[in-house]
Each structure stands twice: as C-alpha cells, then as structure tokens.
Image: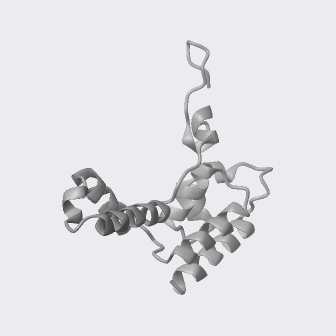
Amino acid sequence: MASASGEEEENAAELKIGEEFLKAKCLMNAEVALILEKKYDQLQQASEDASSQVSQVFERSLQYVTRFSRYKNPDAVKQVRDVLSRNALSEFELCVIGNLCPDTAEEAKAMVPSLKHKGRGLDDEKIDKMLNDLAVIRKFE
C-alpha cells in the first residue's frame, strides 16, 4: 500500500520493513548475550572493579538478553542460526523465530505472518521440521 508521498508503508507481516532492515544482519537475543558476556569478561580482566567500567545501560542490556535467551551454549546458538539459515528465512524472520521458539507451524505463522506467503518453499511440513530441529537443540542445551 502506498502513502500519499508514493512511499510504501512498512509492514512486518509482509516483510516490508524498509530497505536498510532487509539488508541488515539481525542478531537473536542469545547472540547478543554472547557478545555482551564476552565484553563484560574483557572488562573484568582489565580492571579489578569491573562494575566501575560497566554502564548501567550495558548491565541492563546484558541482563535482558540473558533472561530472554532461549539458548545459553555458544554451540547451540550457532546450531540454531544454521538450522534457521538453511530455510531461506529473512534475517528478521530468523531472529523472531529464534527468539520466540514457536512449537508449531501455525504458531510460527501467527508470530511471523510473512511465512504464510506461497512460493517460498516453506510449507507447514518444512516449518514443523525446522521447529522440531530447534526443539532438539533446546532439549540438549
């Protein structure tokens, strides 16, 4: 749908999220947690009092992504990205599914409506297989 200025409106359900977002690399919460934990460890090693080196925003960001990360093990995080990347998902779709961990194809399509579009090669059977692969990774975490 075009606005009066001729620009398309953004709509995540249809993957109309803006050119800059379509090209951007998205990170799942678990990936951000790994990055922030590594940075926190580096700050701890560099200073006796790591808390003096860490801003409140950094600390709260780390707490948030740690709390909402479904995967803690770095190998599991890599496996999740590999499984999702094999299924021709956009970065946005990959991160939503990786963060929210739906159990069924129906649930995944409710969370990420762009999965419903025909012609992508993602039928319910393929989506369920992908979600089952993620469940196995979570189970052995």
**Is residue 96 depicted above or below 79 in this figure?**
above
- Horizontally, is 40 left or right of 9 in the view? left
Q: What percent of the width, then of the height, locates residue 139?
A: 53, 85
Residue 45 against residue 140 in the figure, above or below: above
The image quarter in which residue 43 lies: bottom left
- Which residue is found at the position 32% from the left and 69% from the top? 45
Residue 16, placed above or below residue 112: above
Horizontal and vertical percent position of residue 112: 57, 53
Residue 102, percent from left and from top: 53, 67
Q: Nearer the viewer, residue 123 or 34?
A: 34
Residue placed furthest toward the top: 5
**Residue plotted at (73% across, 56% down):** 88
Q: Quadrant of residue 29?
A: bottom left
Which residue is the extreme one toward the bottom? Answer: 140
Q: Camera-side residue: 118 or 54?
A: 54
Q: Nearer the viewer, residue 68 or 126?
A: 68
Query: Whole-percent x and y of residue 68?
Result: 38, 65
